[in-house]
Amino acid sequence: MSQSSAQQIVKKLQSLGVRQDKIAQDHLMLCYAELKRIKSAPDFKSAKAILVKMSDKIKYDSAEIVGVIIETRCHPALEKIVSIFASHLNIPIQIFHGLSNRNYILNTEIKQLVDKGKVCLSELPTENLQAKTYNALFLSERFWSFMMGRRKVLVFQTDAICCPNSDYRLNEFLSFDYIGSLWPQERPVGLLMNGGVGGLSLRDWKKSVDCLKRFSPVLWPGGEDGYFSFHLEIMGAKVANREECAKFSTQYLFLERSFGAHHISCLSDIDKKSFLKYCPEAKVLLKSN
């Protein structure tokens, strides 16, 4: 595995006498200028229009880990996925829903979890959320202030799942500030990155907010997960490598009996068959995505 771009940059700056804790946005301007913009690059204007309308009344939870999912659609997998995460992990879960799917959610098994205080519903004042707005939300400090957890945040999507038969437990990954689903180091923006994909990822709330304050996300032309994995590593935070990501979440290769998985349609037919034998719960992902 090659050194990540962040590791290379830190090493070069240190050779010039810049300590890692003193690396600032200005030191990265030449790097930013060479990055490639992706189609789902963050749209901060659309995210701001949503965030300014949100209520500041947040009921905080002191739990070590809080699950977070953003889903504004009446998605057929939402009920099953939330139920699996809630029952297997026994952690509080916050669903950021849209204007038109609250009733849909409350007509599923999720309502029982809401009534028991295991799931919290937070409304995003929008009907439809595009990928570029999703990225911009996670790259907005104000959005993080609406999360009810302040320690570790387990981000998941409707194409993610946790595997009850795994050799690994979520608590084993708490030392990481960012760990996501296994993905190649080379990313579309043109950098080599550790950390993995954010569709199933565990993040440190404080380190993530500190990162947003230190490095302006407005200059970032890629996905929110790439922003965090790159800049957190620049900061010296603990970002997972390939082997660690493989243990946490399977995505494009099935190398470990991982804690979970994200977007398993990326797997080869052979790997997919093997993975589903190990984690049959993931079949729901293929039926609805």
Image: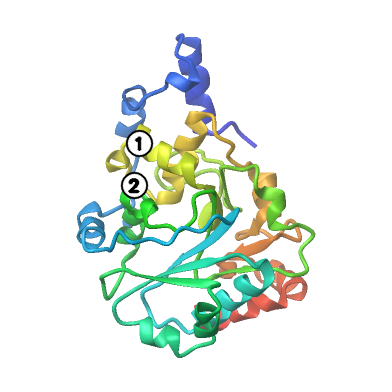
Which residue is label 1 attached to? 213
Q: Position of residue 28 (x, y in %)?
A: 36, 27
First in residue order: circle 2 vs circle 1? 2
Q: Is residue 220 left or right of residue 87?
A: left
Q: Quadrant of the N terminus?
A: top right
Q: Position of residue 244 (x, y in %)?
A: 68, 46
- Residue in the picture at 50% in, 88% down: 108
Amino acid at dot 1: Lys
Residue at mark 2 to residue at mark 1: CA–CA distance: 8 Å
Residue type at tag 2: Glu
Q: Residues within 10 Å of mark 1 (few under 14, many from 20)?
A: few
| Residue occupying image coordinates x 60% and y 60% | 251
Mark 2 in CB contact with mark 1 (< 8 angstroms): yes
Q: Is residue 203 or residue 289 the one in the foreground?
A: 203
Give the number of marks: 2
* Residue 6: percent from left, percent from top: 49, 31
Element under disc 2: helix
Position of residue 166 in the picture relative to residue 20 (left or right): right
Q: For numbered disc 1, what is the local secondary structure?
A: helix
Q: Quadrant of residue 283?
A: bottom right
Which residue is more in the foreground, 79 or 90?
A: 90
The residue at which mark 2 appears reads as 141
